[in-house]
Image: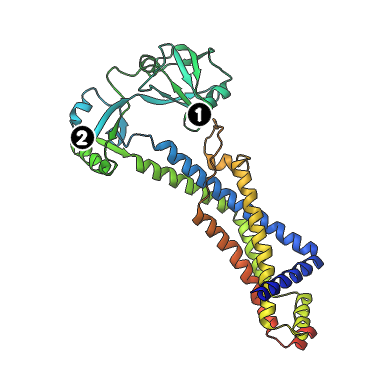
């Protein structure tokens, strides 16, 4: 065992010395490799962290949201709609909700106005999200005015700016009383936006949705798991779009690997011929080249991945945040929780380290099995 370890150490020492003789080429190759891994890992880490963050945010969302449809479009919930639904077994709570979107021409952004189910602000006051407060330059105690759907300017006082840790889901949020909401949107009395259902048993969510559809044929139940799948699909699409844009980098790496696999330089072939002439076996040459490929690829992978980890979780993923995050005007400021997917890490490791290492071994094997004299004369 000690002899084997000593043999590997000697091989590594030789590889390092050989790379030092071609320092410029080795450093250039390592830097390109590191940057490629950095870019790919940054996109994967950022997307995976966003996916996990959205799942955490939505875990407290209602299991089922019921909307009323008219000609395939959403409509307001009429006063007797919840009575038509009747009592559905498994539903622990039914909540009529008031919420909607408001376009602010000042900052050219949409706000989400909502009436909270508990601790609603007093009439004439509102609570605003951190991103909205930052964009409009307002703070608690300041006045702010909106034009209602009747064309009248209504002024409100900002009672509170929602805390920054909630910014991912409250960036553009405006909380107000039911009276103010109906006045702003000219919302008819007794009507609501939708109905949120809380289901006691998570395994019965689909059965509850089926019963709602049977009781209310003009309704559309939306399940929380469907919302999660939609978010996941959106993030997957954005990840694919960024990777497609970066396909040039992937193509450059493929060309690099192909160039490495297509053959050795005259100096490298001569070096292998000399090693064979002084007594090295083919297996020794291949082990030496294997260490060369692993030292370059694995250290570059490790450096690129650690750099990507720092970029995403400590520098905010500045390079890809605007594309992957998705907000058009009101960008929330939040720190992503470090999330590493083992399968994703292994996949990236496999598709970056293994091809390059194999590309190093193939031409080396061809040179090692050739007569040393012929190799040195070539």
> In this rendering, which labeled residue sits more in front, label 2 or label 1?
1
Residue that appears at 61% across and 59% down: 250
- 86, 296: nearer the viewer: 296
Q: Residues within 10 Å of mark 2 (few under 14, many from 20)?
A: some
Q: Would you say residue 261 is visible in this rendering?
A: no
Residue that appears at 52% across and 35% down: 327
Relative image position of residue 35 (x, y in whole percent):
67, 54
Element under disc 2: loop
Q: Does residue 280 appear to the left or right of 235 in the view shown?
A: right
Relative image position of residue 61 (x, y in whole percent):
37, 34
Q: CA distance from mark 2 to mark 1?
A: 34 Å
* Location of residue 185 with respect to 50 vertically, above or below: above
Q: Does residue 374 appear to the left or right of 351 in the view shown?
A: right
Relative image position of residue 373 (x, y in whole percent):
77, 88
Name the residue that disc number 2 marks. 216
Residue that appears at 51% across and 25% down: 163
In this view, which residue lies farthest toward the front? 2
* Location of residue 138 with respect to 101 vertically, above or below: above
Name the residue that disc number 1 marks. 171
- 305, 143: nearer the viewer: 305
* Location of residue 376 with respect to 358 vertically, above or below: below
């Amino acid at each position: 065992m000690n002899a084997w370890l000593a043999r590997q150490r000697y091989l590594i020492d030789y590889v390092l010395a050989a790379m030092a003789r071609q320092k410029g080429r080795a450093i250039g190759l390592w830097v390109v490799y590191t940057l490629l891994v950095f870019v790919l890992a940054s996109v994967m880490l950022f997307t995976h962290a966003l996916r996990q963050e959205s799942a955490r945010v939505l875990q407290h969302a209602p299991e089922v949201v019921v909307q009323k449809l008219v000609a395939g479009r959403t409509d307001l919930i009429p006063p007797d709609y919840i009575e038509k639904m009747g009592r559905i077994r498994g539903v622990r709570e039914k909540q009529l909700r008031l919420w909607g979107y408001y376009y602010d021409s000042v900052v050219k952004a949409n706000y989400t106005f909502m009436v909270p189910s508990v601790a609603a602000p007093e009439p004439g006051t509102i609570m605003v999200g951190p991103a909205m407060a930052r964009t409009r330059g307002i703070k608690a105690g300041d006045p702010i005015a909106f034009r209602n759907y009747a064309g009248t300017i209504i002024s409100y006082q900002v009672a509170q700016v929602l805390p920054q840790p909630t910014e991912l889901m409250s960036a553009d949020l405006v909380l107000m009383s039911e009276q103010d909401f109906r006045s702003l949107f000219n919302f008819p009395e007794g009507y609501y936006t939708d109905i949120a259902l809380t289901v006691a048993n998570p395994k019965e969510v689909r059965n509850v949705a089926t019963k709602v559809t049977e009781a209310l044929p003009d309704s559309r139940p939306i399940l929380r798991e469907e919302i999660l799948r939609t978010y996941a699909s959106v993030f997957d699409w954005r990840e694919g779009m960024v990777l497609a844009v970066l396909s040039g980098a992937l193509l450059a790496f493929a060309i690099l690997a192909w160039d490495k696999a297509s053959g050795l330089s005259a100096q490298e072939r001569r070096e292998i011929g000399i090693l064979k002439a002084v007594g090295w076996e083919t297996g020794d040459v291949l082990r030496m080249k294997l260490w060369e490929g692993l030292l370059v690829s694995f250290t570059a992978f490790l450096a690129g991945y650690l750099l990507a980890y720092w970029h995403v979780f400590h520098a905010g993923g500045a390079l890809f945040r605007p594309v992957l995050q998705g907000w058009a005007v009101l960008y929330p400021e939040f720190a992503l929780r470090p999330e590493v997917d083992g399968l994703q890490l292994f996949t990236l490791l496999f598709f970056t380290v293994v091809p390059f290492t194999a590309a190093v071994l193939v031409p080396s094997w061809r040179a090692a099995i050739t007569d040393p004299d012929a190799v040195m004369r070539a």
